[in-house]
Every structure is written in structure tokens, then in C-alpha cells.
Amino acid sequence: MSYKKLLIFIIAIFFFFAFCHVALFGPLENTHLKIRDLFFRFRGPVPNNTLVAIVAIDDQSIAHYGRWPWPRARIAALIQRLSEAKARTIGIDISFLPSQSQAQPIAPAVELTPLTEWLNIPSRQETLYSNDQLLALAIKKAGNVVLPFYFEFKGSSVEGTPEISESLSHSAYLLFDDVSTLPSLPLLQASSVFPPTPVLAEAAAALGCVNAYLDRDGVLRNDPAIISYRDLYFPSMGIQLARLYLGLSWAEVKVNSGESILLGNHFVPMDDRGFVGLNYSGGRESFPYLSYKDFMEGKIKPELLRDKLVLVGVAAAGLHDLWSTPFGPGYPGVEKHATVVANILDDRFIAQSHLSGIGEVAFMLLIALAFVAVAGSRRSWLLWLCCFLLLGLTILISYWGFSVHHLWFKPLFPALLVLSLTLMLQVVRLPSPVIAPEKVDETRLQPVETMAEERAEVPIEGEVSSVGRYQIEGELGHGAMGVVYKAVDPKIGRSVAIKTIRLDQTLGAKQLADLKERSLREAQVAGQLSHPGIVTIYDVVEKGGHLYIAMEFIEGQELSHFCTKENLLKPRQVTTIIGHICHALDYAHKEGVVHRDIKPSNIMLPKDGRPKIMDFGITKMITSDATQTAAMLGTPSYMSPEQIDLEKVDGRSDLFSVGAMFYELLCGQRPFTGPNITAILKKITTEDPPPLAGINPQIHPKLEAVVSRLMAKSPQDRFQSGGEVVSVLKSLLEDSSIWQ
């Protein structure tokens, strides 16, 4: 290839990756997030802001004061102690929604005497106050308490919701650089709001939103700094706390639309969705945790909280909101608010400015220019040296910007550009100069006939051009058994799929002959199956230590494509597909053939929506040697208990696998999971899967009952045939109430 054409290739590849980068290509953006998580863990914990502390209502507090929720007067007593300790700002991460029991007047308990004295409440018995009134009086006297509220997001409509209270509207942003641009941004749009009970909301110094926003993989990496509701824009709890702690009025807080929030002298970088990138100091308990019980009993010196911002939240097991972060799961929501405050005070949010995107594209251009410089070289080592240097530089720049300057420079697309250009230049080289004939060492050349003979004896899958009468057109993919080719039968012009099966070359001659005979016999049995729901086997060819099985070529997708939560089909569609599969299995079982490895990747879904089962008998071929156990006949997550226990299996074993596949197609997760195969197999034989309705509420109990019966531990408790399953599913499909 000429040098000019190489330059065109390099420029084209650069523009391709630059476009993917600018367009935020979804699947690779997920990889970027995982790389960012990896940077967090590689950096490790860092010292946190010492001005932020947490008073936790922990297990020992619950054990001492009784089950949660407590009377709100106990929180009032805590506010009294915090106020006496001179805490500068107090944030309560506990929802105080209207409650009849908390609003009823009560006689103050003896333990609340210090509180009533602090509030100057008469001690006469006829003077009664409710828990809400005591908490409101304490909040008002402290004068520095921020209470939480939260939004609900159900579309953009807010019709029929109550009017915004004055206390809530006073907690909204006031100053904008250009308020007219905000409605056009992709901000979170709330449909309804849940503020504290009015008497508490009116007493609070401010209200802050406590909603958390998870990325598509369930990890909390960002926090909504601005949420739109009824033409007003509200801050998060963390921003509200930081504003009060810094002593700023709303006139000293400015929102720069889609760019940042200015809290006095503190710059809070924000994307156009109104999110800030959380810069975690570490995992759980990165901030000092003080037990409510210890603090109220005077075991903690009040001086420790002087002039600090104190957050109060529930941390007892089973009572608090837990999130997954880059450092792992189990991160309490109260610490999320503390992280926002610390990031504001320390000016260390993870930021990605508009300039960083331009910088990433510019860096990719420099990478392309570097490869232009080495494209003319015929030295392979120079090409790979350039590759490793640029890869190292990409990762180093990204990590340095992240850990030192809190800037997110995405390394994936530059790295992919480096690898793509390296491989392209390695394969497509400039023509070599002419070498004089006298410089060729003919003694090192091997006769062409010998090389051809060796290739015929040991066929290399990547170089196969024909198998028997079938002409190979290309690869369809790689599987556990070998390569799958697309081929054509020249006699009748029919397209076929050819699956290769490697025969075990470590066996003795007699064992290998027996294995071939049994494999051919299995293929013959499977080839006799004739059903529209089963992929037809046309031919079996044995060549060079491989079996080549010619079968029906299907254009479509494997069912595994629809097993993720992003690609789930509707329950009615899934039920119809399972009905077709059971109909085909019923036919095969009546013919005396058990599949043994029913799973989503063995089911093709053509364009007409009628599934076809693949690999009947093929799994048994590669595991039929006597040295292998029956436990190998199948995929662990879909195997029946009798298959795991090495018992004789029949068609009901396939129905168990259908049930496991049915479950996964309905909710997007497998019924039995674990850290390893042993744990999965143990769950299959001893435990029931999590209820379907708990994962996907759309699943009707009648449909869940069918799935549960398919996965019964004992074969006697399952459906006894595929035809029986088809009959039940037909009745469900005809019942319109199930699919509403």
C-alpha cells in the first residue's frame, strides 16, 4: 500500500474515534465509568475535610432507646445538645413527613427535661406539646438546621400537585446568569414533592433535596445539584448545607446555566444536566462517625463539634439507604451529603469541562500525527514502541489529571485509537524494496509440497476454505466448541452454518475411534429431528481431527441478547417465545432426544419471531468420553438438580432449564447466581430463586407460578411434558387481565 493511502487510513480512523468520542457512544461510555472507578480504587482513600462530622443513629442507639422510628422529641434533644456544642450548621437526613402520632400532644418525658428547660417550656402538667412542636421549637431556636425533602419523577406533568409552600420556595435558587436557558437543558424534572410536615418546614433555616441519582450500572457517581420543579430550581442537601455553613444568602449564590454554581468564592463545576461529579475520599465511614447514644450520654466531648457542620442520619443495619460507589457497596446516604459538602469546601469535585473534551480530541490528533511519522518505517519494533509509549502517556495523563487536579480526561478512545492504528499499520505495510536474487538464502526455503501436506494433516481453522462439498464464505463467530462458519452447498446453492468440534487428541487410538463413532451417532439422531422450532442438521464431516456439522443457517439474534435489563422483551412476548420452545422440546422428547443444555445462547430468534433451538446432541458429542462426567453436560446456571447430582435425566430436566431461561428473560437476571460454579450449583439444589415480582413488578402472579413450577427441585413437581406447558401458556395468553 502506498504512503498516501496509509495517511488516508490514519486520518479516517482518527475521525471515526473523534466522532465516537464527541457523540458519547453509550456502550463505551460505560467503560469510561468503570475506568474512573478503577482510578478511585488505585488512588485509594485520602484525608477528608475535618470540618464535617456525622452523628449516627446506629445499632447501639436503637438497642438502647427502642425501635425506629423514635418520637421526634428525641431528635429535638439532639439538636439542643448540638446547639450547646456550638455546631455551626446542622443537617438532618431523616424524613419528617406528616404523622398523626407525632402531632398529638403528649406530656414531656423525664428524659426530655433538659430540652424543655432549654426551650423555656413551662413544666406544668396541663401544658402539653406534641413531638412535632418540640422538634419545631428546637429547630427554630437553633436557627441553623437544614431539613430534607425529596422529589418524585413520573414524567413532566405536575398537574394536580399541591402548591409550593413558602418555606419550600425560599429554599430555591434565586440568582441565574441566564434563567431563560435553563428550561432547554436536560435537567431532572420533578413531578411531585414531599416536604417535611409544615410546622417543621417553617421552623427550619432551609430545606435541601436528598434525591440520589444512580448511573445505569447502579453506581452513585454524581449528585443532582439542581432539580427543576414548577418553574423553580432547587439545590441538593449538600449545597444547601454548604451555603449556610459559609454564611451566604441566596443573593451570593449564582447558577451559571449548564456550567457551574458559585457559592461565594467556591466554584462548583456542573454539567448541562445539573450534576456534579462526586470525589469520594474513600469507602464507608470516611467521615468521623459519632454514636447518638454516646453523644447524648456525654461520652463525646462537645468541643469536638464546635464550629463544625454536623450531619445526622440513621446508620443502623436495615434502616438506612445504602448506595454503591466506586469504592464498593454499602455507602450510607448521609455520607453522600457529607461528601458534597466536603467537595465544596475543598474545591475538589471531579470535573469535566468543555475544554477537556477539546483537549481529548486534540490529544487524539497528536496520536494520529505520531503514527503518520512512523508509518513509513518498516521496523516493526518502532511501531510497537510508539504504541506502548502512547498508551502509557494516555493512561498517565488521565490518572494525573484525575488524582492531582480532579479533572476527568477520558482515556478509552485515545487508547483504542492507538491500538487500532498499531494493528492497522502492522497488517498493512508499505511495499518492501526489491532484494537482489543473490541475497536470498535458498537453503532455508521449504518445498511447497511439504508445506501443503503438513497443512492438510493438521487443518488450521482460520485457513479452512472448504469442508467436504461445502465452500466456506466466512466466520460467523467463535464458541466453546470451536469456530462457526457460514458456507454454501454448491450443489443446491443453499447457505448453511458449519460448526466445528475439536476431538480430544490426547486420547488413545481406540478411544478416539469410539468417540468419533459415538459423536457421529449423536449427530445422526439429532439430524432425524424435523420440527420448525429445531435447527436442522444436514451433514457431518470428519476431517483432520475435527468434526464439521453442517446445519440450517438462521439469520437472527440469540435469546441471550434479550436477557439484559436494557433489552428485556415484554412479558407477553417472552411467554409466546417460551411456548414455541416447549412445543419443539415436546416433539424432541417424544422422539427420545433430550437436549441437556437449554440456555439463551442456544436459542436463535429469527426475524419472524419463532425461536429455533440449536445444538441438539452436540453438547453430548464433546463430553461423551467415559473420563468426563454427566455434570459437564450443560451450563451451570441452567442445569437441573438431577443433572447436577449425576442422575439419569429426561425431558423434565430440559423443562427446568427452560424455567431458568424464562425467569432471566422476564427480569434480566439469572435465578441462581454466586461467586463461583460451586456456589451456583449449591443454590440450584437447595435454594429457591428470588421472587420474580420483587425484581420486575410487571410480572403477574399466575405467570410467576408457571416459572416456579418449571423450576421445582423434584422432577415430579414440575410440568411433566412440554405439551403440558404449552397448554398452560396458551390459557395465560388468552387472559387479557394478566397483560394489562
Image: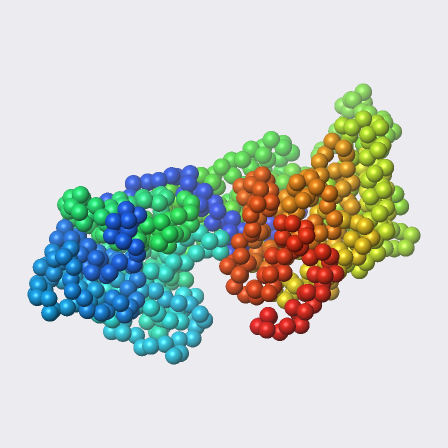
Q: Residue 144 lies in what quarter of the image?
A: bottom left
Q: Is residue 107 left or right of residue 350?
A: left
Residue 600, horizontal then vertical, whole percent: 66, 53
Identify the residue shown where x is 91% and y is 52%.
Answer: 491
* Extreme residue toward the top, this view: 443
Q: Residue furthest bottom?
A: 160
Q: Is residue 343 visible?
A: no
Check the image and name the residue furthest to the right: 491
State whether residue 151 appears in this view: yes
- Taking the spot 14% from the left edge, 57% from the top edge, the residue there is 110
* Residue in front for this viewpoint, 157 or 194: 194
Pick whichever, 635 or 719, lies toward us. Answer: 719
667 left or right of 318? Answer: right
The x and y percentages for residue 302 are 15, 47
Split into 4 quadrants, where in the image is the C terminus?
A: bottom right
User: Which residue is drawn at the image coordinates 85% and 44% (left, top)?
Assistant: 540
In this view of the protein, which residue sits in the foreground, 614 or 253?
A: 614
